[in-house]
Image (spheres, helix red, strand yellow):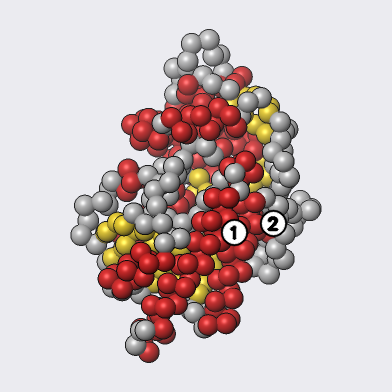
Amino acid sequence: MMKILITGGAGFIGSAVVRHIIQNTDNTVLNVDKLTYAGNLESLAKVADNSRYQFSQTDICDRAALDQLFETFQPDAVMHLAAESHVDRSITGPAAFIETNILGTYQLLEAARHYWNGLAQDKKAEFRFHHISTDEVYGDLEGTEDLFVETTPYAPSSPYSASKASSDHLVRAWHRTYGLPVVLTNCSNNYGPYHFPEKLIPLVILNALAGKPLPVYGNGAQIRDWLYVEDHARALYKVVTEAKVGETYNIGGHNEQQNIDVVKAICNLLEELAPNKPEGIANYQDLITYVKDRPGHDLRYAIDASKIKKDLGWVPQETFESGLRKTVEWYLANQEWVKHVQSGEYQNWVQNQYQA
C-alpha cells in the first residue's frame, strides 16, 4: 500500500487520478489543491467519504504549509498536477501561470527534496516525484506526418506552455543536481467527464444544448490528439508505480482530429442523444460560428506514445468515438454539476473571450 500526495487533485485530470486510485487500488491519497476557479470538490463526491482519501486546501507556493503536509502524511510518491492550464487565460493574464507553474513547482520540489533527504535508505530509493506536463512544450509540428517523441526539442509558443516547459526543466534539474527520483509525463489534449467548460469539447456540448453559438477559432483546421481523461489517469498511475527513475513518457490517445471535425462530431451525437433542440434551432451544426484566431495558435500537436506501450504496456482503452459518446452522455446526465461550475466568474470570462 502506497501513500500518494497529489497536487491539483480537484482539477480535471487530477480528480480523475484521485478517483482511479481510490476506486481501483488500496492506496491512500492526500489531495492538495488551492481550489482556484478550475478546482472543484464536487468532481470527487464519489470518493470524498472514503477513509483512504484526505484533502488539504493548500497553495503549492506556500512552502511552510507543504513542509507540514509532507511531515504529517509521509508520502511514498508525489504526483504533481497543480497548474494553471488554459492557454487563452495565459495570454490575457500570464502572471498566475508564472506563479503557480514555475514558482509553485520550485517550492514543491524543495519541500519534496527536504522530506526525501530525511528518509531511511530503503524509503529514499522507493520515493517518486512524478511531474505531469503537456505536449504543448514541444511547440508546433511542421508536417502532417511528424509526431512528438520524448526527445523532441522544446519550443513553447504561449505563456502557458513556456511556464510548463520551465517547470519540466526544473524537475529534471532537481534530478540531475540533487538526485531527487523523478519521472515525467507529457500528455496530449484531455477530454471526458468533469471537464471545466471553458475547454473546447464541454463548451461546445453546453453551448449547443443552450442554443448558443459554437465558437471555432480561425478556420477550425487546428489538429489535436485527443486523450480520454480516464485513460490518462490509468497511464499516470502506471508511470508513478512502474517507471524507472529519470524517464519521460509521452501519453497520447492515438486520436488526431481537426477542431472543426470535433465540433461536428459533437453536434451529430447531440442530434441523436438530445434531439429536442432549443427553439428556432433546426440543426446543432447551424450554431457553428468562426471567431478570430488565438494569437500564436499552434496548428498541429500529435504524440507518439509507443514508448509507454513498449515499456509499461499502456494503450488507451477508448477510441475518440467511444470516448466522445461517453463524454456527451455524461454532460447530459450531470446537469447539476454543470450548473454549479457555470457561476459568475466563469460566465464573465467566456463572454469576454469568445466575442466573435
| The one of 93 and 347 positioned closer to us in this rendering | 93
The residue tagged 2 is 156
Does residue 258 appear left or right of residue 340 in this picture? right
Going from N to C along the chain, the mark reached first, 2 or 1, is 2
Badge 1 amino acid: Lys
What residue is at 73 percent from the left and 45 percent from the top?
Answer: 296
| The one of 47 and 252 positioned closer to us in this rendering | 47
User: Which label was assigned to residue 128?
Assistant: none
- Expressed as whole percent of the image width and height from the top left, the position of residue 31 reads 34, 58
Q: Is residue 259 visible?
A: yes
What residue is at 39 percent from the left and 52 percent from the top?
Answer: 34
Looking at the figure, which quarter contains the C terminus?
top right
- Expressed as whole percent of the image width and height from the top left, the position of residue 110 reads 47, 73
Circle 2 crowding by C-alpha within 10 Å: few under 14, some 14–19, many from 20: many
The residue tagged 1 is 164
Does residue 39 appear left or right of residue 306 in this picture? left
- Expressed as whole percent of the image width and height from the top left, the position of residue 19 reads 34, 54
Circle 1 crowding by C-alpha within 10 Å: few under 14, some 14–19, many from 20: many
Asked which secondary structure carries label 2, the reply is: loop
Residue 38 lies in quadrant? top left
Does residue 166 appear left or right of residue 195 in this picture? right
Examine the rendered structure and indicate whether residue 158 appears above or below residue 197: below
